[in-house]
């Protein structure tokens, strides 16, 4: 064995060791990180700004009759297990104050978001009407005839034409 031959073997050994290190070390670590990034739950966001959508629907389909409302993207945590809320509305009786929450988790597309905004907007319309008639505090009929008529009216106006 000549001296250059030995050197070549040593160099080859060093190169191989680095390749092996790369294969057994760097690649698995990269894979594990990639898998963890993929597996970590991604926070879903609404397709459209819910306040802009509310204002647009108020102007277009409710002729601006609804009071200004706070509309936020927020998941709704409830104490009841297995209870899913797509959206809800907080309301100060007699105060014309409303806060709509639209869950980004349960409104994954614009279709659900439009339906949720419309659903809550109809609640606001009915509450406003009943409070004006002086029966706000007693009004409990959440999805009764008045609310259903509001939704039907929206459908007839074409509010859901790309949704249904
Ligand atoms: Zn409802």
Image: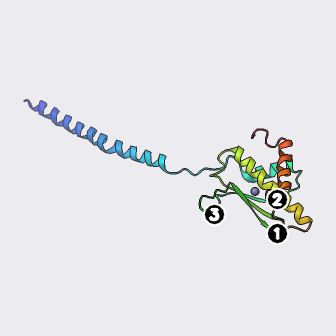
Ligand 1: does it lie within 8 Å of the C-beta at label 2? Answer: no
Mark 1 crowd level (few <14, some 14–19, many ≥20, 10 Å Cα): few
Mark 2 crowd level (few <14, some 14–19, many ≥20, 10 Å Cα): many
Tell me which numbered mark, 1 or 3, is placed earlier along the sequence.
3
Ligand 1: does it lie within 8 Å of the C-beta at label 3? Answer: no
Where disc 1 sits, the SS reads loop
x and y percentages locating residue 116 in the rendered image: 73, 51
Tell me which numbered mark, 2 or 3, is placed earlier along the sequence.
3
Looking at the image, residue 31 sits to the left or right of residue 82; the answer is left
> Dividing the image into 4 quarters, which one contains the C terminus?
top right
Looking at the image, residue 161 sits to the left or right of residue 9; the answer is right
* Residue at 59 percent of width and 61 percent of height: 81
Residue 111 placement: quadrant: top right
Image quadrant of ligand 1?
bottom right
Tell me which numbered mark, 1 or 2, is placed earlier along the sequence.
1
Q: CA distance from mark 1 to mark 2?
A: 11 Å
136 or 101, nearer to the observer: 136
* Residue at 35 percent of width and 44 percent of height: 28
Q: Which is more foreground, mark 1 or mark 3?
A: 3
* Residue at 66 percent of width and 58 percent of height: 74
156 or 37, nearer to the observer: 156
Residue bearing the label numbered 2: 124
Q: CA distance from mark 2 to mark 3?
A: 21 Å
Residue bearing the label numbered 1: 93
> Dividing the image into 4 quarters, which one contains the N terminus?
top left
Q: Which is more foreground, mark 2 or mark 3?
A: 3
């Amino acid at each position: 064995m000549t001296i250059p031959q030995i050197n070549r073997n040593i160099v080859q050994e060093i190169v191989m060791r680095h390749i092996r290190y790369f294969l057994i070390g760097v690649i698995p670590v990269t894979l594990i990180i990639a898998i963890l990034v993929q597996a970590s739950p991604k926070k879903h966001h609404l397709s459209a700004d819910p306040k802009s959508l509310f204002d647009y629907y108020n102007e277009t389909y409710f002729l601006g009759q609804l009071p200004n409302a706070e509309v936020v993207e927020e998941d709704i945590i409830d104490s009841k297990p297995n209870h899913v809320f797509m959206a809800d509305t907080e309301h100060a009786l007699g105060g014309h104050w409303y806060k709509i929450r639209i869950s980004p988790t349960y409104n994954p597309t614009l279709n659900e978001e439009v339906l949720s905004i419309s659903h809550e907007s109809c609640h606001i319309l009915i509450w406003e009407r009943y409070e004006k008639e002086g029966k706000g505090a007693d009004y409990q009929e959440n999805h009764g005839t008045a609310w259903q008529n509001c939704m039907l009216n929206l459908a007839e106006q074409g509010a859901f034409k790309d949704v249904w």
